[in-house]
Amino acid sequence: MLILLADAFTADLPKRLEAYGAVSQDIGSIGEAEVLIVRSKTKVDQAMMEKAPKLKYIIRGGVGVDTIDVEFAKSKGILVDNTPEASSVAVAELAFAMMLAMPANIAPADSSMKQGKWLKKELERSELLGKTLGLIGIGRIAREVAQRAKAFGMRVIAYDKYVNASDAAEMMSLDKVYAQADFISLHTPLTDETKGMINAATIATMKQGVRIINTCRGQVVVEEDVAAALKSGALAGYAADVFYKEPPEGSPLLGAPNTLLAPHLGASTAENLIRLGDSITDRVKKYAGK
């Protein structure tokens, strides 16, 4: 069988996968591929799958499968898989780093120093100790964030439609999370229900001056509403590693105050790429029956 690696992984992954079939890194070979392996860059839509009559198995290295037309894949008998266990620590560490950096004014302190400014009085800091972190979703990544937040003396609350109780956080309604949280970290899949869930109406129910961290999917927020809330002061900060469109050309977030933005770096640690390779190899081995 042909295994197609459509995106970049560790340099040794093609060699490791050769034990289970021929390996290609040329997207032009999609027509011969039985196994397709992607990350977030490659969108596996109906048009791509129609070019792949031999395709039986798609693996997304990472969390979520919203870059894949899962329903069309099912209609064609194509198995869709991902590797959620691999990226949890990498994404959680970035989310927590962003939560640390915003109230500490790390980004403006650094940029102002390099501009020759000494803003010791202007750049006040605040601490995480005693603050409340609200998690939207309580999956693997959120639980890793919760563990780190508790180590910093934070209270951790959470909402998850599918979870009533968790040892990682105090579970409550979404309205209560919005009302009580000083920081909100988003860890929800992108669905019709969650698309645009952070908008002008929901921001109005949050604490004045809340800070939001988004390392899940850009489309769960309405970027125009977030930018407006940052300008009005309703939001004290917004940190994002994901955007409605990537790269976020023309995004209102680029000109909004009190933002901390990263180019989708959540899963891009050397350690995580190794874990991704291990998870993908295990799945291909199981699929191949070897």
Image (cartoon, helix red, strand yellow):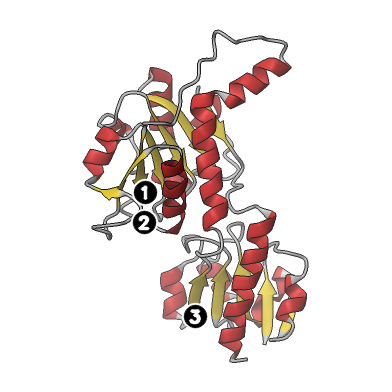
* Sequence-earlier tag: 2 or 3: 3
Q: Residue at point 25% right, 57% down? A: 165
Evaluate if marks 2 and 1 touch, with contact meaning CB atoms under 8 Å apart: yes
Can you identify the residue that label 2 sits on? 191
Q: Quadrant of the C terminus?
A: bottom right
Q: Position of residue 279 (x, y in %)?
A: 59, 72
Q: The residue under label 3 is which amino acid type?
A: Ile
Q: Which mark is residue 195?
A: 1
For residue 230, which quarter of the picture? top left
Q: The residue under label 1 is which amino acid type?
A: Lys
Q: Is residue 154 above or below residue 228?
A: below
Evaluate if marks 2 and 3 touch, with contact meaning CB atoms under 8 Å apart: no
Position of 124 with respect to 271 (left or right) is left
How dense is the environment of label 2, judged by Cα within 10 Å: few (below 14), some, or many (20 and up)?
few
Q: The residue under label 2 is which amino acid type?
A: Thr
State whether residue 52 appears in this view. no
* Sequence-earlier tag: 1 or 3: 3
Q: Is residue 165 above or below residue 6?
A: above
Secondary structure beneath dot 3 equals: loop
State whether residue 88 appears in this view. yes
How dense is the environment of label 1, judged by Cα within 10 Å: few (below 14), some, or many (20 and up)?
some
Secondary structure beneath dot 1 equals: loop
Q: Residue at point 44% right, 59% down? A: 140
Can you identify the residue that label 3 sits on? 78
Q: Which mark is residue 48?
A: none
Q: Position of residue 234 (x, y in %)?
A: 35, 23
Q: Marks 2 and 3, Cα distance to the nearest angstrom? A: 21 Å
Q: Marks 2 and 1, Cα distance to the nearest angstrom? A: 6 Å
Q: Is residue 234 above or below residue 18?
A: above
